[in-house]
Image: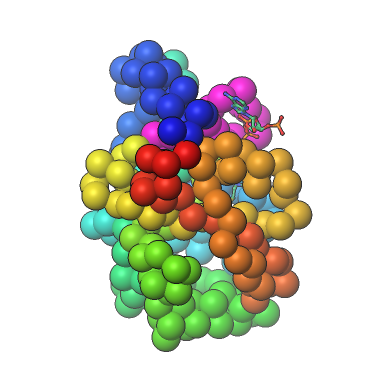
Amino acid sequence: MTPLLTQFDASLKSLPVDTIGEARPEELDAIVALHLRAFPDTFITPLGKPMVQLYYQALMSYSGVCFIVYRNEAGGIVSFAVGVQSPSQFHHHLVLKYGCRAALTAVRCRPAALWSVMCRLSRRLLAPKNGDYGVYVDAECASFAVDPLMRDPSIAAFLTAALIRALQSRGVANILSGVRVDNPRLLRFARLFGYREVCREMRPDGHEMQILIWSKNEEKVI
Ligand SMILES: CC(C)(COP(=O)(O)OP(=O)(O)OC[C@H]1O[C@@H](n2cnc3c(N)ncnc32)[C@H](O)[C@@H]1OP(=O)(O)O)[C@@H](O)C(=O)NCCC(=O)NCCS
């Protein structure tokens, strides 16, 4: 078994009720604010706050989402981890339902960044990658952050364990995650949870991503 994941299986049960749970629609603003603090100038942030808002709205309204949040005692959002089942289906949902609004919103903020996002999305739509990594990827980690103002040891680990287990309970066997190659700390963290590195991909924004996969079948043999 993966040691860190197993360790957190037990710890998850000891958390106060409501600390970890599915995000509620009224928590959208707090999630967006946390995103902007955690990703001040990367990921989709350069496209502006309205675009970030649309992205999380799209995630929350997707039927195959597993949107886990960690709340403090006052009910404030300290961290979130989002997994989407059938990633290529989510990208269709994102483009078809929010594409026009997102494009109009983003083009006002930064046309050059919009172009790179459109390239990325169309690449995904045209070539769904579910089977491209040697195993069938049935879920993807779409976003993951701990509030830099309230960082506390182990919150990231609680959320990672909770997301893996929540996706697993929905029948997911293989979870894909992309981590920037210049983030060795997060790469090490992912490995501790049983993610294995499969390949590297260049993002249109010029950042190289390490693609990792967590597999249920491998957990049994570790
Ligand atoms: C990535 C992110 C979510 C990690 O959260 P964090 O609060 O910094 O993480 P933590 O400190 O709890 O855990 C990471 C470290 O603790 C270690 N760790 C945590 N729990 C552990 C445990 N029980 N046993 C051993 N090691 C543990 C990790 O290996 C890592 O080690 P290091 O700091 O000694 O190198 C956070 O930094 C963040 O929000 N970053 C900005 C957004 C981002 O990059 N998101 C990810 C996109 S893919």
Q: Main secondary structure of the magenta part?
A: helix
Residue pictured at 56% horizontal, 62% vertical? 198
Residue pictured at 33% horizontal, 52% vertical? 173
What coloring was used for the rendering?
Answer: rainbow
Q: Is residue 53 above or below residue 27?
A: below
Residue furthest to the bottom: 126
Image quarter of the N terminus: top left
Whether residue 53 is visible to the viewer of this picture, yes or no, is: no
Q: Position of residue 153 (x, y in %)?
A: 61, 23
Residue furthest to the front: 221
Q: Is residue 164 above or below residue 88?
A: above
Q: Position of residue 195 (x, y in %)?
A: 52, 47
Range of magenta residues: 146-164
Q: Is residue 14 above or below residue 216?
A: above
Whether residue 177 is visible to the viewer of this picture, yes or no, is: yes
- Is 161 a magenta residue? yes
Q: Position of residue 38 (x, y in %)?
A: 63, 44
